[in-house]
Image (cartoon, rainbow, N blue to C red):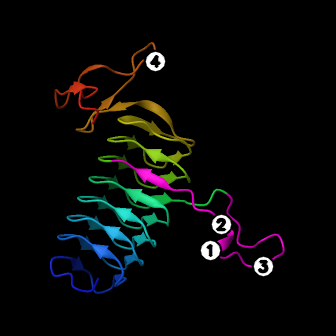
């Protein structure tokens, strides 16, 4: 796609003519967007971000500097991805085959990653292959996410473990002393939690 009048692309960014970029999106210094990538409208792609072939990014996403989104990643609308987050896609990574020949695209299988609406991933977190991160979930900085994260779940650590819940406004809601999830009114935004609409 070569005609992008409402898209801001920094002169040093490398954006494939085969990528689809939505209106109002900004792509900053040294970012690379590969063939058939799809980025929605109103999103921000920070400095030195790598968006691999066929990656899908929704509307109004904010992707900070030095994020790597490899083939197989889908990011829904309204997602925040902090600096230096890395999405992996190969469960059994090797440079060569058993016979010593260099691996090609035909020698490995992609394990997709899905980041659902409104989720936030802290700086330097690593997301392993095959993981789904739920709606409005939050991943703490430096975490290594090895399993699915539920809607509104707060996880942190290596490997990432449940630390409580998080509301849509971002308030941390600690689990009850008996280990059951928080239920009630968010002290920050005063919304009922969990939300009744499943969001």
Q: Is residue 150 magenta?
A: no
161 in relation to 86, above or below: above
How far, Cα to Cα, is label 2 from label 1? Answer: 6 Å
**In the displayed structure image, the side of residue 101 where residue 24 appears, left or right:** left
Gap in angstroms between the C-alphas marked 1 and 4? 45 Å
Q: To which residue does mark 2 refer?
A: 108
| Lower position in the chain sequence, tag 3 or tag 4 | 3
Could you tell me which secondary element the residue under label 2 belongs to? loop
Residue at the spot 71% in from the left edge and 67% down from the top edge? 94
Q: Residue 189 got which mark?
A: none
Residue underneath mark 4? 179
In the rendered structure, which disc, 2 or 3, sits on the residue that comes first in sequence?
3
Q: Are marks 2 and 1 in contact (CB under 8 Å)?
A: yes
Question: Is residue 186 something that shows in the picture?
Answer: no
Q: Nearer the viewer, mark 3 or mark 1?
A: 1
Report the magenta residues as a range: 92-116
Disc 3 target residue: 101
Label 1 SS: helix
Instruction: Report which quarter residue 147 is drawn in.
Output: top right
Place of residue 92 in the rendered image (x, y in percent of width and height, measured from the top left): 68, 59
Taking 41 as reference, is 17 above or below it? below
């Amino acid at each position: 796609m070569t005609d992008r009048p409402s898209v801001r692309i920094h002169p040093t960014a490398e954006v494939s003519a085969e990528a689809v970029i939505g209106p109002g999106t900004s792509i900053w210094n040294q970012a690379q967007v590969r063939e058939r990538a799809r980025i929605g409208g109103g999103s921000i792609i920070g400095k030195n971000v790598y968006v691999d072939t066929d990656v899908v990014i929704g509307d109004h996403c904010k992707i900070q500097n030095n994020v790597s989104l490899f083939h197989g990643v889908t990011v829904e609308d309204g997602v925040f991805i902090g600096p230096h987050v890395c999405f992996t896609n190969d469960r059994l990574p090797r440079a060569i085959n058993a016979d010593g020949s260099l691996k090609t695209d035909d020698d490995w299988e992609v394990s997709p990653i899905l980041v659902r609406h409104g989720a936030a991933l802290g700086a330097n977190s690593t997301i392993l292959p095959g993981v789904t991160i739920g709606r409005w979930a939050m991943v703490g900085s430096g975490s290594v996410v090895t399993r699915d994260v539920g809607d509104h779940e707060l996880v942190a650590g290596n490997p990432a473990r449940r630390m409580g819940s998080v509301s849509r406004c971002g308030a941390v809601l600690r689990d009850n002393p008996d280990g059951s999830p928080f239920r009630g009114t968010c002290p920050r935004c005063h919304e009922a939690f969990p939300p009744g609409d499943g969001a």
